[in-house]
Amino acid sequence: MSNIDKIFASVRNEFPALTQKVHGKKLAYLDSAATTLKPQSVIDRITQFYSFETSNVHRGAHYLGDVATQAFESARHKVAEFLGARQTEEIIFVRGTTEGVNLVANSWGGTHLKEGDEILITEMEHHGNIVPWQMVAERIGAKVLAAKILDNGELDLEDFKAKLSKKTKMVAFTACSNVLGTNTDMTLLTKLAHEVGAKVLIDGAQIVSQTKVDVKAIDCDFFVFSAHKLFGPFGQGVVYGKREILDGMSPYQGGGSMIAKVTVEKTTYNDVPFRFEAGTPHVEGAVGLHAAIDFVERIGFENIHSYEMELLKEATAKLQAIPDLRIFGTAPNKGPIISFNLKGAHHSDVGQILDQEGVAVRAGHHCTQPLMARFGIPGTVRASFSVYNNHEDIDALVKAVVKAREMLL
Ligand code: PLP
């Protein structure tokens, strides 16, 4: 066993979900792009919070209120460091990537977009980074354009550049396609967008578990992600926004905590970030996210990247050797995600056979219908890899796909 395999064999032992059998077979969990499994340290931290620290935040005049508030705000500080933000106040807690995009589309877009303005996205966006922009554009009379994707799954940079103009006010793109695995050049796209005076939102849902992100170096205006794709809890997400931009944005939702003063006639609003966090937040979500960041930092992104690339390379080569199998997305710079179809078989049928073999994948359109239309297919089977996967999981996948081919073709 190589050194890196040894490190990750021990990481794998931290995931209780992997000790179970599915349909009598050893579980090969290859659906991390949908959500990652949770390590024991994250589960324990949430249990500890519920057991001994439960209290509401920012309001309790008692010991436990302080403990909970400290845990919550310390999570915000951890996320700020994790993303390389300049200030802790640049971190807003939301429910997930989707709510994060909705917040920016409504709050920033509602104030700054005008009739005739353009929002540039790409053809490989998740619906979570398409629909919120369409909704605000429809309300305001702005227009959503999408930059094209090349046959190998890379962004068509020439088309992206051609679609940028003085009318472009927002460029919103994914750092990594949840279907093709394609990683985009966040720094370059941000620079190009800024050259025409547009603001930039990066959908970081798939990138945060793969690589170290530095929002200062990228210079994006907004960056959003979900904790549940980073070994953390569901219902917890993050919006990073540059302070000077957040300061100029109106609240997205109204209620408790986001106010400075309320009279029946009028309300003045709290400072950033609280202005954007109406109501009781998902406290244990933030606390669990803190533990999840501790977990990835303990392993180290260099190790994570090397290991996941090793798995990706091996799985790609073995799948490619199966006759009638087509992989969608072969960009040179991609994350540990492989989408494929067996020619002549429906993706759902393949997914079901894999499930019976204990191999958990996703089969469908992956909330990317425009991308499916681009490739002229209704869906794909998607296998995605993470820190707890190993070579045995790849072999289980390949064996199950070979079986599916024999049964279906
Ligand atoms: N963007 C990308 C690239 C995703 O993969 C996902 C989830 O699959 C989302 C956005 C939406 O994330 P969430 O459902 O956690 O809000």
Image (spheres, grey):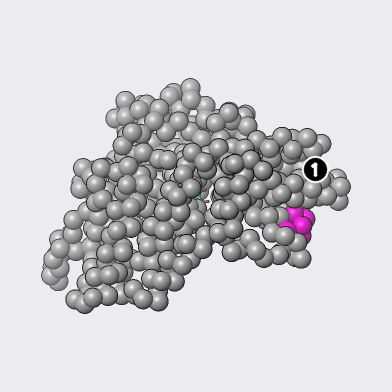
Identify the main secondary structure in magenta: helix
In the rendered view, tell whether residue 380 sits above or below residue 14.
above
* Percent position of residue 74, x then y: 29, 58
Asked if residue 355 is among those painted magenta in the image, a careful observer would answer yes
- Report the side of 29 relative to 262 (left or right): right
* Percent position of residue 216, x then y: 31, 37
* Percent position of residue 29, x then y: 64, 55
Task: Classify the position of the N terminus by image quarter.
Answer: top right
Q: What segment carries the magenta color?
A: 353-358
Q: Is residue 16 among what the camera can see?
A: yes
Task: Classify the position of the C terminus by image quarter.
Answer: top right
Q: Mark 1 = which residue?
A: 344
Residue nearest the viewer, comparing 175 with 321: 321
User: Is the CB of the residue bearing disc 1 within 8 angstroms of ligand 1?
Assistant: no
Name which residue lies at 14% across and 71% down. 264
Residue nearest the viewer, comparing 158 with 329: 329
Name which residue lies at 34% across and 51% down. 79
Residue nearest the viewer, comparing 241 with 228: 228
Disc 1 residue crowd, few under 14, some 14–19, many 20+, Cα 10 Å: few
Q: Helix, strand, or loop for circle 1?
A: loop
- Report the side of 314 relative to 39 (left or right): right
Say what amino acid the circle numbered 1 marks.
Gly
In this rendering, the count of numbered labels is: 1
Q: Quadrant of residue 327?
A: top right
Q: Quadrant of residue 150?
A: top right
Residue nearest the viewer, comparing 157 with 57: 57
Name which residue lies at 40% across and 27% down. 188
- Report the side of 127 relative to 31 (left or right): left
In the rendered view, tell whether residue 273 sits above or below residue 319.
below
* Percent position of residue 294, x then y: 41, 54
